[in-house]
Image (cartoon, coloured by chain):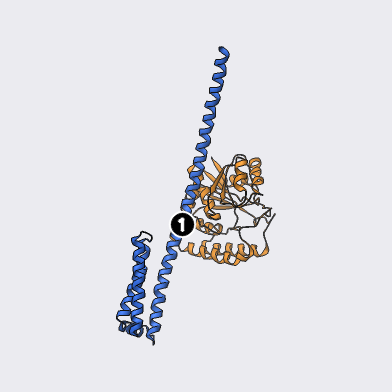
Chain colours: A blue, B orange
Amino acid sequence: MNFLTQIWILILSISIIIYLFEKIRKQKYIVKFSMPWFFTFLIIIILAIFPNLIDIIAMLLGIKEATNAIFFIAICMLVNNIINLSFSMSEAKKQSIRMAQEIALLKKDIFNINEEITGEFKLVQDIAVLYNENSNKKI
Amino acid sequence: MKKIVIIPAYNEQNNLIGVINDLKTNAPDFDYVIINDGSTDDTISLCSENGCNVINLSINLGIGASVQTGYIYALENGYDIAVQFDGDGQHEAKYLKKMYNEMIKTGSDMVIGSRYLTKNGFQSTALRRMGIKILSKLIKVLHKQEIKDVTSGLRMINKRVMTAFVEYYPYDYPEPETIAFCIRKKIKITEVPVTMRARREGNSSIDSMQSIYYMLKVSFSIIVDYFKRL
């Protein structure tokens, strides 16, 4: 691997790691979801520092070109991360549906309670009016 | 026995009142609740004007989650029997009594109103009938029980099934998968012949373009369900 390429990969990876780190520090990103990406870029950094590792991996995988081995590893890691994302999405969907259901049921409960209260309130009002009318008559 | 009819409704302003009136006259001993699945038409105002018993979901969750909301409501309010009943006027309330009698007589946990036992009334298009037949065969092969009308949205269930459905209910195209799920859980299912009307207004939740996806998705979920543990 070209020395210049190595430098560029290092700069890119480190800046992405810093970016993700900043997001977490500002509480805009949950640590749980950042872990696969930190892991991914850590591996990329290791490979950029020790390019000989890529040759070994390429040999083990039976891939002639070291560059192709890099692509292969990168795609594997991306697929892993994306599948994990769709798991999280599915979980989030399940949770949001249950929440929407609970909210709808709560709204219904509140509506019923309101009806009851206004009903009782009207009853009290009616009684008060009747009472007033009667007491006026007596006078 | 407290009985309730759950009516999932998404943009059914033209059909809903007819359905409610049908229920009030032909099945007076059943309570009802409309699950308004985030409709964008006047369903909400229509329901409040007519004083209907309605649960309004703020966002469109799809048929499965709507019906599940109804089951949660039914359980929380101590109902023993719940009926899923389409809000589009396809189903007729006069069959509820028949289904209820069948449920008591056979001691079933679930009674399905089936279009294909006597083959009267609206039978759906040939392509759709074929799809339903394939799904029915798939369930028969996997679970050794034949249910003719696996996609019927007219189903009566008891508390046991309600509890199971509150725990898990598929979100889209739920009917055939839940039948496989119920047979696997040793829930006793019987079918009762009913006739259904063609939809009066609006479109079915499944259009022809989605049919292939529907078949694939439902077959896949039935097969996956087969491999779930009890």
Q: Which amino acid does label 1 sit on?
A: Lys
Q: Which of B21 and A42 is in front in this view?
A: A42
- Residue B160 appears in the picture as rendered: no
- Residue A134 appears in the picture as rendered: yes
Q: Where is residue B222 in the image (x, y as percent from the top left)?
A: 52, 63
Please determine whether, in this image, residue B222 is positioned above or below residue B197.
below
Q: Where is residue B56 in the image (x, y as percent from the top left)?
A: 54, 47
Q: Which residue is drawn at 36% across and 67% down?
A: A19
Which quadrant holds the C terminus of chain A? top right
Q: In this view, does B186 lie to the left or right of A32?
A: right
Q: Residue at x 52, y 30 (%)?
A: A121
Q: Is residue B138 left or right of residue A70?
A: right
Q: Nearer the viewer, residue A136 or B88?
A: A136
Please determine whether, in this image, residue A55 is positioned above or below residue A117.
below
**Quarter of the rendering containing residue A52:** bottom left
Q: How many numbered marks, from 0 up?
A: 1
Q: Which residue is drawn at 67% across and 64% down?
A: B126
**Quarter of the rendering containing residue B152:** bottom right
Q: Position of residue B155 (x, y in %)?
A: 58, 51
The chain to which mark 1 is attached is A
Q: In this view, does A91 lie to the left or right of B195?
A: left
Residue, far bottom: A64
Q: Position of residue A69 (x, y in %)?
A: 38, 82
Which quadrant holds the N terminus of chain A? bottom left
Label 1: few (<14), some or many (≥20) within 10 Å?
few
Q: Mark 1 points at which residue?
A: A94
